[in-house]
Image: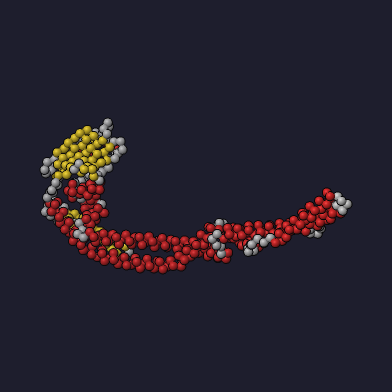
Amino acid sequence: MLEYLRIRNLALIEDMELEFSRGINVLTGETGAGKSFILKALGFLLGDRLGADMVRPGADRAQVEAVFALRDEDLVLRRELLAESGRSRLYINDVLSSQESLRELRPRLVSHTSQHAQQRLLQPAFQARLFENAFPEPALLEERDRLLEQLHALAEQRDALLARQAGLAERRDLLEMQQLEIDKVAPEEGEEERLEALRSQARDAEARREESERALLLLHGDEGPGLLDLLAEFERLAQRMGRDGDEQARAVAETAAALRQELSRMAGDLRRRPAVENDADLDQVEERLFALAQLKRRLRRTLPEILALREEIVENLSFLDVCSLDLSRLNKEEARLAAELGAVVARIVPLRREAATALTKHLEDQLRGLGFSEGARVLPEFSSHELWPGVSDERGRLLWAPNPGQPAQPLDRIASGGELSRFL
């Protein structure tokens, strides 16, 4: 029971206190007096959201406080709305608490309805939920919903498989042609870089070999005399010039002889110079690089992209080959789950009918206390609807016969506003 309510600095209310007595309490007033706003403040206290603009101008916070008398204790709730941030703080018995704890408490504190709420009774889905809420074994309903969720998930998987299968089937010829082109060249990861390195090494080795041969040709000559021949001739000329006692010419001849010997040693070193090791066949390297370049040009991709494409093609073609097996597996799983769902629904239907009959009898008793005649009747009616292909459940609705001898008709078709309010 709500015993006390205080509202401070909320919208136009500066400070208001309400104390409630036992039994029924009625708040009356002109339109716009604030009756509905009191309910809005109570809703805020019990977890509803309000914006910072609801704080009274000039105040730093709004506050709603209430005392509830429960069977075994009094409960004090206080919730504050901060003007600066729009955030709220909740206190339960003066202890700062979470919204989660309030959600657990709320069903024990208040049952709340507002204007036009009776219109929900006109919704078939709401009437069906009434029977679900009265169901004696909610675990069965949870099992039904779990199985149905799994079936929908399987259906999504199957639809995705079928869509992918259809898309790939149209491209199968292209995929197989691309796979043939790639496999014909058979590129390897990092192959292009390795071949380019080998080509560079082979070209460097060839250049060094040609340089050594050129140096030896300069020393020994090709079609004419080389440096060694010219230097030997120069040495002989200097020796002849020194025969007459020309010491300077003799020294020149000795220097030329020493230089010729050094050049001869250099020529020997060049001939004995080890060849640069290079096992690569430059022609084969160039041929392979050309084949890779042609493949890249035809597929308009880099070599890493071609390797990724080959993996994708293999995966897609494998998918097409095994897709029928996956679909068969999903169909078997669907059949198994549908059978389980059918068995659960078969248990639910009679229990739901039994609970619905008890609920409508209880409603009749309550309605007689609200002014209806002893002959007023509330009856459940059920219609079959397909829950899943091959599995049918029942959906309930309320039938209403307010007067004796009148055939029961759907509540949402014949009930007046006053009757709906008393039903609610």
**Residue 214 appears in which quarter of the rendering?**
bottom right
Relative horizontal placement of residue 57, taking residue 323 as reference (left or right): left
Residue at the image point whose x is 26% and y is 59% from the top: 142
Picture quadrant where residue 64 is located: top left
Q: Nearer the viewer, residue 207 or 90?
A: 207
Residue 65 appearing in the image: yes
| Residue 102 coordinates in the image, percent (x, y) | 23, 46
State the residue lying farthest toward the top. Answer: 58
Q: Residue at x 31, y 38 (%)?
A: 85
Percent position of residue 163, x then y: 43, 61
Residue at point 73%, 60% (across, down): 268
Note whether 323 is above or below 51 in the view shown. below
- Say whether residue 165 is left or right of residue 231: left
Q: Is residue 233 above or below residue 39?
A: below
**Colour theme:** secondary structure
| Residue 17 at x, y percent in the picture | 17, 36
Can you see residue 230?
no
Q: Nearer the viewer, residue 110 or 62?
A: 62
Q: Relative to residue 21, is residue 271 depicted above or below? A: below
Residue 401 percent coordinates (x, y):
17, 54
Q: Nearer the viewer, residue 87 or 55?
A: 87
Identify whether 8 is placed above or below 222: above
State which quarter of the image contains the N terminus: top left
Asked whether, in this view, residue 370 is left or right of residue 224, the answer is left
At 27% from the left and 61% from the top, the residue drawn is 144
